[in-house]
Amino acid sequence: MSDFKKPKIHYYQNWPDLAELGSGCLIIADQRFEDHLWIQDDPFCYFVKSGEELKDLRGFAEHIERILALVDQIPQRPLKIVGMGGGSVGDFAGFVASVLKRGVGLIHVPSTWLSAVDSAHGGKTALNVGGIKNQIGTFYPAQEIFLIRPLLQGQPQERLHDVLGEVLKICLIHGGDLWKKISKLPELEEKHLWKFLPDLIEAKYQIVKKDPQEKTGTRHILNLGHTIGHVIEAEAKLTHGRAIFLGLQFALAWSRHLKIMTEKTAQEIGKTQMGHYLLDPAELKKELRSLENIRELLSQDKKRVESGLRFVFLKAPGHCVVKTVTIDEIVAEVKRQAAK
Ligand SMILES: NC(=O)c1ccc[n+]([C@@H]2O[C@H](COP(=O)([O-])OP(=O)(O)OC[C@H]3O[C@@H](n4cnc5c(N)ncnc54)[C@H](O)[C@@H]3O)[C@@H](O)[C@H]2O)c1
């Protein structure tokens, strides 16, 4: 068993006092919160434009110089970086915390559903290199995570649509009651997400704590839906969350085709409302037909091993199967699903 220390997770129905963050903090926040009442009087805020460009290695030296100039004015020690924003801000702030002065404290304040459910948990930080996502990074879990209901509920409706893929992914991996309850929902609403947040997060930690640094392979199942999801994200320029939803559809259809998933299981999944969406191939088919650089993108995938790629299949909710497949096999399956 690893010595993984789960962060303290705080759930706030209302805005907490800023002092709850403690002392010695530099807040790295999405610039959309520049005039936000919660932080507007804090002198130690560094605002960034969210998105993949923020994670680009080429801009990092400039950011870190400005961040160092700010933290050197903070009188209190130990230092803490507070990342307030979606997944891009969290990945960036986490990376900064892991290298700044050889590592300082880290608190995440996720502001998108995707970051609240997924990216703030599990300790992965990342920067992009040469336009390719997450090529460098560290494992650096936060000590604390603040989940603030009014911050999350301020998001536009499409962000709910965005998180659906990651929510269904963790429910399918976990299976049991969590899948049963979520799969029955006619659609995912804010009130459901807030209610199920602790269970969704706990389901991720149950896997992460067994393999915090992805050394034994257990954690690999969290990549369900991500192989083709990342290709679609890069090619179709869809949001991460939407691309993962399509990647999940691809993984389920392939599992079914290879009979890793039985027809009976597929039909049971299809009877639920969420399962019905997952098995409907219309949008996926359209995206698969327009993929052009699939071989190149797959060869850059971090899940690559000498003989191919470790692909996560689903036998049934709660039961993933990891198999090494060749890039040729993936390309052939993309063609099969695009033509169906
Ligand atoms: N580290 C991990 O384990 C992990 C896991 C999954 C995804 N990721 C990364 O997360 C990123 C995607 O996450 P994301 O979609 O949250 O990214 P994001 O930070 O780019 O946010 C998406 C958009 O939402 C806006 N936004 C943020 N909070 C808002 C709020 N409260 N109200 C209204 N708008 C708000 C942002 O300004 C931005 O325009 C990708 O870079 C992906 O690689 C990391």
Image (tube, rainbow, N blue to C red):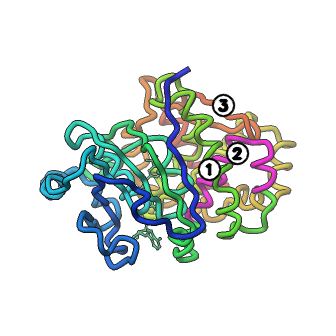
| Depth check, front residue: 95 or 132 | 95
Image: 126 above or below 26: above
| Residue at the disc numbered 1 | 248
First in residue order: circle 3 vs circle 1? 1
Q: Amino acid at mark 3?
A: Val
First in residue order: circle 1 vs circle 2? 2
- SS for dot 2: helix
Residue 59, located in which quarter of the rendered image? Answer: bottom left
State yes or no: discs 1 and 2 in contact (Cβ < 8 Å). yes
Give the percent coordinates (x, y) of residue 165: 60, 56
Q: Which quadrant of the figure contains the N terminus?
A: top right
Give the percent coordinates (x, y) of residue 90: 39, 54
Question: Do we see residue 165 in this rendering?
Answer: yes
| Depth check, front residue: 145 or 169 | 145
Q: State how far apart marks 3 and 1 are (Cα).
A: 14 Å
Q: Amino acid at mark 1?
A: Leu
| Magenta stretch holds residue 69 | no
Q: Which quadrant of the figure contains the C terminus?
A: bottom right
Between marks 1 and 2 in the image, the one whose residue lies nearer the viewer: 2
| Residue at the disc numbered 3 | 321
Segment colored magenta: 162-182
What number is the disc on residue 172? 2
Q: Amino acid at mark 2?
A: Leu
Mark 3 crowdedness (10 Å alpha carbons): few <14, some 14-19, many ≥20: some
Give the percent coordinates (x, y) of residue 312: 60, 36
Image: 184 above or below 176: below
